[in-house]
Image (cartoon, rainbow, N blue to C red):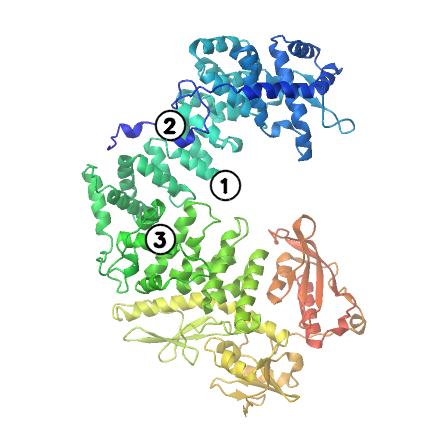
Amino acid sequence: MESSDADENVLVLPEAWRQALLPRRGGRTPVLPPALRPGAIETVRAAVAASRPAIDAVLAHEESDVGLAESARAYLRGEADVSGAAAIAALEADVRERPRYRSVGRLNRDDVFRDADADWADFLIAEHGLAFAARVFAEIDGVRTVWSGWDERPDRPRSVDRDGWSGGQAPWAEGPAGQRMRALLAAAGDADHAAVVTGLAGHRREPLQRLVVSYLVPSQRDWVQECCRELPSYPLPATSAPELLWCVLGDEDQVKAAGNWASFGDWSRNPRVIYTAIDGAGAAVAPCLRWALDDETDPEVRRLLVGALAVIPTDDAFRYLATRLRHRNVLPALLEMIERFPLRAYRILAELTAGTSERARMAAGLLDAHHCARSAAPVDVGDAVTATIEAVRAARVREASASETPRALRKAGPATTMNRALAAMLPQVLLKDGQRALPAEATVQLVEALTKATPRRRPAARVQEALDALEPRSLFEFGWTLLGTWRTSGDTDRAGWALAQLGWTGGDEAARRLGAMARSWTGQDGIRLPLDALDVLAGANTDIALIQLHLVASKAKPKRLKNRAGTLLRKAAAARGLTGEQLADRLVPDFGLDAAGSMTLDYGRRRFVVGFDERLVPHVSDEAGKPRKTLPKPGVKDDPELAPAAYAAFAGLKKDVRTVAPEQIRRMERAMCEQRRWTGEEFRELFAGHPLVWHIVKRLVWIHEEGGKATAFRPAEDRTFADENDDVLTLPETGDVRIAHPLHLNDLGRWTEVFGDYEIVQPFPQLGRPVDALTDAERAANRLDRVRGVTVRTGMVLGLERRGWRRGQAKDAGVQEEMVWTVPDGLSITLDAQPGFPVMTPGEWPEQTLGSVWTDSGVRFGDLDEVTASELLLVLNELKADAR
């Protein structure tokens, strides 16, 4: 039956809420009369008997309230004494539960709610009637048991008094016992309920006690009003007042009267409180739900809050969720709201399609999907909404026919509501020609196929055939937006298939974005997502994906990410029979450069050539070789297709090279310091013959070694090799090649002159690199004090990580107080620093005071080779120069 505007203004609570919300007399949910539980009566009698020795000891204690103790004894004798029954119930529960709390480290019985206490409600009713039981429950939280100190029997109560209300807590009322009593009172007949109200009127001495009484009988409006007026007199910390208050409010006026107390604090954000509040106060609760949502981050609590807001039948509630579609956990709730309020959905979604924002696009998709879903039973939504729907459809790319759709996506199968909503809000996927888009149902089938994705699983042949028939850029945009939408629809840490499908749809661009996301992750927002992203990169196993893994292993801040990326890289290298460094050598992309290491950008009537400087920063010159400050934008006389494509290609080149250039330069410098060697074939293929790396190679001096003979050379611009006299040098195909360290260049001065004559600027200090040597005393020691007591900037110390150092193990409070360098022969050198580097915020303290530098036990500094020793001293000298 079609809903009307009037129907959509009626609050109807979902049936699924029934088990959680607390019943109230005259509420929106019918109250089912609960029967007394016979077993509870025998259980309580046995429990009191078992606790009797301890109870008697408490009542006899000199510090116990004399009047309360006498009332308790009277109740034990069979008298209907309300205060006595309250005291015995509180004591029995504490004696019964205290040992268990102690065993799990709980010293306060108010920290948990005890299911067994609920038996007391049935027991008291069976023993002395409903009115008596209600009066007892109005007094129990006013009873305070005092516990023995640790020098006595800490697992037994010592004394009892009437100071319970002063603590601000009401665990009996809040817990299962109070919930059971409230249910029994709500279901009582009119005469019995009237007697209960009359009896409770005499148990409203304290503000918190008055609130407890209203919690038991929330239908007494004047009592609730009184509680709302006096709430601000409570101390806010550690109080039961807000949670009890939400369970008694019955209309908008009472919510307003409660003022600032009517807010869902952390302890009130649970189904029992929120559902009961909506049952009582209805739509008046909505602003408080919104305030709670604005600062809530826990996924489970967010699901609760948005699910509760989704039943509120107001435009404000619908608009609040609809304008936050990119927020976590909102989408599933909004889909329920659209089904619940279809006419409201038409109106508000149509409003939100205005503009070009992502929110407008998502609202347009939902509106179109909503209209399609109701096409079998169309409704009159008015001319304005109809015009909006038509405009939304006109703006979309024409959909392909069934015969034009890839075969694997033609068959309409079952699709989840969530996946249909994602077909609705995501960018259209175009066919290969870029002129037609997948039909809506085919897009749903695409999403369903992508749900089978895992990081290591490749698409089935028929699915791969369908993916190959789609335009790559639109497929990537679809897949990337799908991930973002899926993340915001639920737990941000559990992206699952929505992340893995990027291995099927995203290609190299997805790899770049996943790598960038992992590198920039701070570790503060959960780490599951970037860890899973690394698995996707490893599963893709393309050169670009492995490059991104390498960058994460080098640059990411959280150690778990660095370690995971390193592990995956080692596995990938082992699968190819390589070491990690050998794999990294082979993963440098050429970015489409020609054999000369340049790129020609064709604008049609004019062309530009891209080259690179010593830092691999791209620069542009015209065809005549004249440098330009930047690449000009396409003009009206340029080719309308070639020029924009060339301009975009240059923008992409700058972005890509900027990602890898610093890492490649650092790797080359470290290779020099660690005296790493390559075969002649590797040098020619991976360095001298690489279009991008060539721009670094030609600016360095290299050494060829074979048969004990070492020959220094430089690669010239024409790809030949030259010696220090600038004579052409022919190198044998065999032997090893390494980057020369200045300590190994006998003709360092001559090489410096050659590079000066050719104005060759080096990518890092090589020929002009400072060198140093250990003193005889230092060579004989395993500890250096060159920087001991020196205070330097923290950034200078952390900067050593770019030179191969790493932070040591975390110590007290998660602070790392050492920097460790593992030298080429496997020895470890450690530098002490205080106050150190907190694991999560290593730069928290601006300065570090350095300590000694020391080696592994039994190792002297004289055991280091001269290059390693010089590089160590270079680091120490730079730190000392930075001293303040």
Residue 425 on image: x %, y %:
32, 49
Q: Secondary structure at mark 2?
A: helix
Residue 159 on image: x %, y %:
71, 19
Q: Residues within 10 Å of mark 1 (few under 14, many from 20)?
A: few
- Relative to 348, is 234 on the left or the right? right
Is residue 746 placed above or below 781 in the rendered structure? below
Give the label on residue 298, or none: 1
- Relative to 809, is 217 on the left or the right? left
Residue identifier under label 2: 283
The one of 750 and 646 positioned closer to us in this rendering: 646
Residue 770: image quadrant is: bottom right
Q: Amino acid at mark 2?
A: Ala
Q: Secondary structure at mark 3?
A: helix
Q: Amino acid at mark 3?
A: Glu
Q: Amino acid at mark 1?
A: Asp
How many numbered marks are there? 3
CA gap, disc 2 and disc 1: 24 Å
Q: Secondary structure at mark 1?
A: loop
The one of 563 and 340 positioned closer to us in this rendering: 340
CA gap, disc 1 and disc 3: 28 Å
Q: Nearer the viewer, mark 2 or mark 3?
A: 3
